[in-house]
């Protein structure tokens, strides 16, 4: 492989990690031997904000449909050396999540290995810290008493007795060893730029705070998360870890946490966002407990007006910001902190300053016309 250009298939290329991954792979000095050939794939055609120049080819296919997957991917099966799996479907019920996500990855693996000339050697699979926490996002089931691991989380902590599609994906890629190697990337809260990742914490908070409100905006949360540590991951560092593991001997057949390598409190993040969005900083007022989900549930039409008025990319609030996803995170009763020791011991040293990451990605969201820019004059927008 030394003398051949490595070829990537990034499934989920329009998602929060996908775009950073394609950009990393196209760097002149990218690990693996210079710029890669990159096939970017997604279920829907590329949106306007997606820079098509970051991929050599864009493939639209539905991974749930095995016929479609085989039809679209078998033509490149003799070429692709590395599969980067940065997509998921979230149906709510975890047994359903397991079935659909496993079927999608299986369909793609089947298509890429469908020819004797298949060059596929490695699969990176992105999961998350729910691996260690259990079903934090199961709003339908109040009877779940979370009994996750105590942080800081370690890769070798045993699995929890809850169904989790992350476990199913790990088992699926491991079952292809030794003919394929794999790496699992247990990302913490990811921040990056995509209008197709409704769980993007920064996008969620930006749609709430970016349209300059007439008054300072409080952040919902709890005294605990306001004052205790949490971590996040810049999509660029996460992309770097995927690429590193894909081409490094010590990255093979391993799972890695992925964080920026520092920690923050929500209070400090809210201070930074207040600055970035030029809204007043408001101290936590626990007596003023409010629910972001309730507050934002009828703001779709207001968002449409903002989009229109500021010439933003056409987006729907409910598609770009899942407020249900951020609420449990803002109310964690434990410190959401992952160790990066294993990565470092294996030779991965990627890191980022979380506050700089936030400023960078808010800038990107503005540049990509996904949120209003800083300059416009504050007008009451009906949110607050
Ligand atoms: C699956 O994909 C094939 C090929 O694109 C298409 O003809 C078929 O209608 C699809 N099946 C479903 C259930 O969507
Ligand atoms: C709720 O969660 C509990 C504990 O995991 C489980 O036993 C039960 O079946 C779940 N109920 C529903 C409706 O999903
Ligand atoms: C992830 O971080 C947690 C918390 O420090 C740690 O217990 C766990 O071993 C780490 N896992 C990996 C794969 O590094």
Image (spheres, rainbow, N blue to C red):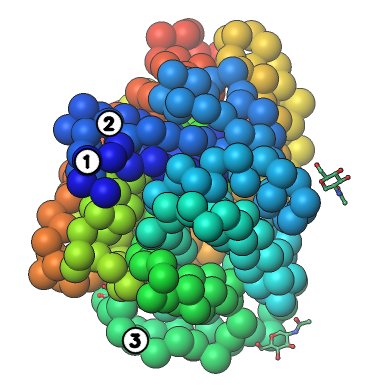
Q: In which quarter of the image is the C terminus?
A: top right
- Choose the circle earlier in sequence order: 1 or 2: 1
Residue 308 position in % (x across, y down) = 67, 11
Ligand 3 is located in which of the four quadrants?
Answer: bottom left
- Disc ID at residue 346: none
* Residue at the (49%, 87%) spot, across then down: 160
Marks 3/2 in contact by CB < 8 Å: the verdict is no
SS for callout 1: loop
How far apart are the alpha carbons under marks 1 and 2?
13 Å
The kind of secondary structure element at disc 2 is: loop
Residue position marked by numbered label 2 in the rendering:
35
The picture quadrant where one finds residue 132 is: bottom left
Relative vertical location of residue 98 with respect to residue 192 in this rendering, above or below: below
- The residue at the point 42 percent across, 52 percent down is 119
149 shown above or below 338: below
Whether residue 274 sits left or right of residue 199 in the image: it is left
Residue 222 image position (x, y, % from top left)? 44, 63
Q: Does the residue labelled 2 lie within 8 Å of ligand 3?
A: no
- Whether the residue under disc 3 has CB within 8 Å of ligand 3: yes
> How many C-alpha atoms fall within 10 Å of the one at disc 2: few (<14), some, or many (≥20)?
some
Residue 379 visible, this orientation:
yes
Q: Sequence-wise, which precedes: disc 3 or disc 1? A: 1
In the image, is residue 301 above or below residue 374?
A: below
Q: Distance between the residues labelled 3 and 2?
A: 36 Å
Q: Is residue 373 placed above or below 138 in the rendered structure? A: above
Q: Which of 61 and 218 is in front in this view?
A: 61
Of 306 and 314, nearer the camera is 314
- Check disc 1 and report the residue beneath it: 3
In the picture of the structure, the residue carrying the numbered disc 3 is 157
């Amino acid at each position: 492989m030394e003398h051949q250009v490595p070829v990537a298939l990034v499934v989920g290329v329009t998602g929060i990690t996908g775009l950073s991954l394609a950009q990393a792979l196209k760097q002149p000095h990218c690990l693996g031997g210079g710029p890669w050939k990159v096939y970017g794939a997604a279920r829907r055609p590329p949106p306007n904000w997606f820079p098509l120049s970051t991929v050599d080819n864009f493939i639209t296919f539905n991974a749930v449909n095995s016929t479609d997957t085989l039809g679209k991917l078998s033509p490149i099966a003799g070429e692709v050396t590395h599969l980067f799996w940065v997509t998921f479907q979230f149906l709510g019920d975890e047994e359903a999540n397991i079935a659909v996500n496993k079927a999608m990855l299986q369909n793609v693996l089947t298509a890429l290995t469908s020819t004797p000339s298949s060059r596929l050697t490695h699969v990176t699979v992105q999961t998350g810290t729910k691996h260690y926490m259990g079903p934090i996002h199961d709003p339908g089931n109040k009877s779940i008493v979370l009994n996750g691991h105590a942080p800081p989380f370690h890769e070798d902590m045993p699995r929890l007795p809850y169904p989790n599609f992350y476990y199913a994906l790990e088992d699926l890629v491991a079952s292809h060893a030794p003919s394929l190697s794999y790496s699992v990337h247990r990302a913490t809260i990811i921040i990056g730029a995509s209008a197709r990742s409704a769980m993007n914490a920064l996008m969620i908070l930006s749609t709430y705070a970016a349209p300059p409100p007439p008054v300072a905006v409080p952040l919902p949360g709890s005294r605990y998360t306001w004052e205790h540590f949490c971590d996040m991951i810049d999509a660029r560092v996460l992309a770097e870890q995927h690429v590193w593991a894909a081409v490094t001997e010590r990255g093979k057949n391993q799972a890695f946490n992925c964080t920026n390598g520092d920690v923050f409190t929500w209070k400090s993040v809210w201070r930074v966002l207040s600055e970035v969005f030029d809204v007043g900083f408001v101290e936590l007022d626990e007596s003023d407990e409010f629910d972001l989900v309730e507050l934002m549930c009828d703001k779709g039409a207001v968002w449409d007006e903002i989009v229109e008025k500021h010439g933003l990319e056409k987006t729907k609030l409910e598609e770009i910001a899942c407020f249900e996803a951020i609420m449990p995170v803002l109310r964690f009763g434990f410190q959401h902190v992952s160790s990066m020791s294993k990565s470092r011991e294996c030779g991965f040293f990627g890191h980022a300053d979380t506050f700089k990451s936030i400023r960078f990605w808010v800038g990107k969201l503005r540049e990509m016309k996904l949120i209003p820019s800083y300059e416009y004059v504050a007008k009451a927008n009906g949110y607050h």
